[in-house]
Amino acid sequence: MTGALGGLLTAALVAVAGSASAHSLLLESVPAPGAALAEAPRQLMLRFNNRIERSLSRVRLVDSRGADQALVVSVGVAEPADRLTAAVPPLAPGRWRVEWQVLSTDGHVVSGRFDFTLAQ
């Protein structure tokens, strides 16, 4: 009985570990986390390790005072399935935080954030 129970427990742990690896991970962004920019980016791009559901994902910019600007995610057919892109409105100089939330291919919602600075 202990051997069978141990086998079931091992199988359950492997299943959990396998599903966790399917979560979307941010691989690349423009601007990059921690970037110091001389001018505001015209577009924000986030690339993940797997396909994400763009229509159920969101991204926003938050300034140093906490005021946020929701960005409209491009959902065009030409967009790669592992990316979120959004046009960026004119930004004031200072520190900006990018906050994102995506629906992973495994059905889990994953979120994250990073900062960049726009020169004054």
Image (cartoon, helix red, strand yellow):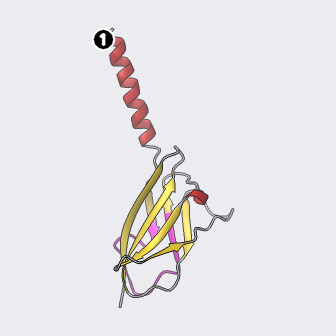
Residue depicted at x 54% and y 64%: 84
Judge whether 23 appears above or below 27 on screen.
above
The outermost residue toward the bottom is 120
The outermost residue toward the left is 2
Tell me if mark 1 has few (under 14), some (14-19) or many (20+) residues whose alpha carbon lies within 10 angstroms of its own.
Answer: few
Asked which quadrant contains residue 25, the reply is bottom left
Q: Residue flagged by tag 1: what amino acid is it?
A: Thr
In the rendered structure, which segment of residues is drawn in magenta? Answer: 29-46
| Callout 1 secondary element | helix
Indicate yes or no whether the magenta region holds residue 43. Answer: yes
Picture coordinates of residue 22 (x, y %)?
Answer: 47, 44
The outermost residue toward the right is 77
Judge whether 36 appears above or below 100 on screen.
below
Residue depicted at x 67% and y 64%: 78
Q: Quadrant of the N terminus?
A: top left
Picture coordinates of residue 120 (x, y %)?
Answer: 35, 91
Residue depicted at x 44% and y 58%: 26
Picture coordinates of residue 101 (x, y %)?
Answer: 47, 59
- The image shows a total of numbered marks equal to 1
The outermost residue toward the top is 1
Residue occupied by mark 1: 2
Picture coordinates of residue 17 (x, y %)?
Answer: 39, 36
